Image: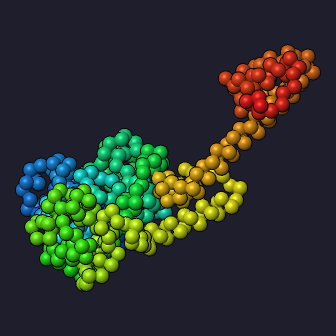
Amino acid sequence: MTVLSPARKAHSTLYHLEPIGVGTPDVESLTGYISRLAKAHCLPVQPLVSEIIAPELGMTSMVRSYSRFFKESACSVNGLGQYAEDFHSAMERLTLRGDLSRLTMLPWKGVFDPGGKGLNKPLKSWCSSCFREWFKNGALLYEPLIWTLSSVRICGRHGSPLRTTCPGCGEPQPVLGRTYPIGYCSSCGEQLWSKEDEKVEGEEHVTEWDLWVVTEVGRLLSASPSESGMATQKRFQSAVADVVRHLKVTNTQELDRSIGFGESTITQWRRGRGKPRFDYFLLFCFKTNIVPKDMLCRSSEEFLRNSWRPGCKEKISRKKESHKQEELRKRVKKEMETLLSTENAPSLKEFARNLGVGLGYLRYRFPKESKRIASRYRERLRESKESLFHERSEAIRKAVDDLRGAGEHPSKWKVFRKIPGILPGGGKDKDLTRVWKETLEGKHIVGDPSGC
Ligand SMILES: [Zn+2]
Ligand SMILES: [Zn+2]
């Protein structure tokens, strides 16, 4: 073991590596933890899985087809079904840790569909800004559990859409890469944050739903074991009944329809027939303005306080954003005001990049200010183009005079080679060519390129 290696507890087979962010919205995923553990042991992921984890699991089906495991099943390691159960307990035995279930959705297995429908993404997604920031600051690259959930499309820290393909080769990425470490493409090895992605994905519309999901899922992931321990199917069943009663719903099929469910989803939840899908549960809470964590970990009917019937939003005051989103919003607003009070006129893209947020976020949250910044930038471009034109026109006139004074013919080639930043011959710049011609003809030119 090198000096920098993590500790190996007495008799633990693998390092007793501490997981990142337990108890916070940014808690690490179990697949990400496995990748980091492989790196700590100076191993690619595949041999760690095949030589150490698989024998511990006794999973003969996995041993038969690793390629299928890495391609299809690895995403379930972060879920709440059998795969997650087996993997987390094997990893806890190998590392002698007791907190690895919190890197999966297992704390919520009492409530949600164990089949994992609508829970984990089949492929990896990531926030380039987070990777870039950590890399720049010399921090560890890791993969938060929240990125692996199907309903989450944006980064909670940056508000920008998560990426799903390599910026180098365009390939989608498996949830658990076999060889390359976290942050690198499994196909070409490129850094997954290597290119600015605002143009590719920042243009995507970030919706109120996206912002709500990332905030509320973050709250669930930061729940303590005693909080998530309160989430049982029985409590959920009675919470659904409370919602129906509180909203004075007489026909649950109507409520189903207004949320966008099939006809008997809510009835089945209320009767305790089967567990809800995670994504359906989130949609139910969003449409009824209920905080998911309050509904699952409730000890009273307090969670109903701000609830409303889908479609009746305006009657009830809007729920407050989470503290984190609010802080981000405040910070961005202040930066925008400061910028607009100065002469500085960067492009909106450059401004978003400096703030570490997506273009989509700025346009969605601050449409007026974003438009002003963009139009100031366009104005600045126009002005600098104009002043450059005037500068070059003057230089052309001077060059013509100088050449004539030296007894030379002021050909286009001779004149333009004296103008900095212009190709000899003038390239294809019609306006400057016009200036040259008119100077030869003795005409005096005033005004901008358009001739106004
Ligand atoms: Zn981010
Ligand atoms: Zn690639």
**Taking 211 as reference, is 413 left or right?**
right
Task: Measuring from the top left, give residue 272's x and y in whole percent.
Answer: 11, 71
Residue appearing at x 48%, y 56% in the figure: 364
Residue placed most toward the observer, 372 or 190: 372
Residue in the image at 36% along x and 41% along y? 170
**Whole-percent x, y for residue 153 in the image:** 35, 56
Position of residue 106 in the picture relative to residue 19 (left or right)? left
- Asked whether residue 428 is in view, the answer is yes
Which residue is at the front of the view, 289 or 165? 289
**Residue 41 in sight in this render:** no
Residue farthest toward the front in the current orientation of the protein: 250
Residue 128 falls in image quadrant: bottom left
User: Residue pushed farthest bottom?
Assistant: 300
Instruction: Give the quarter of the figure containing the N terminus.
Output: bottom left
Question: Residue 391 placed where, x, y %?
Answer: 80, 35
Q: Residue at x 32, y 70 (%)?
A: 308
Q: Quadrant of the C terminus?
A: top right
For the point 12% across and 49% down, the residue is: 65
Q: Give the answer, above or below, for where 426 lies relative to 21.
A: above
Q: Is residue 170 left or right of residue 235?
A: right
> Would you identify the image quadrant in which residue 175 lies?
bottom left
Task: Tally the marks.
Answer: 0
Question: Is 446 above or below relative to 112?
Answer: above
Please state if 66 lies on the left or on the right of 387 as rendered.
left
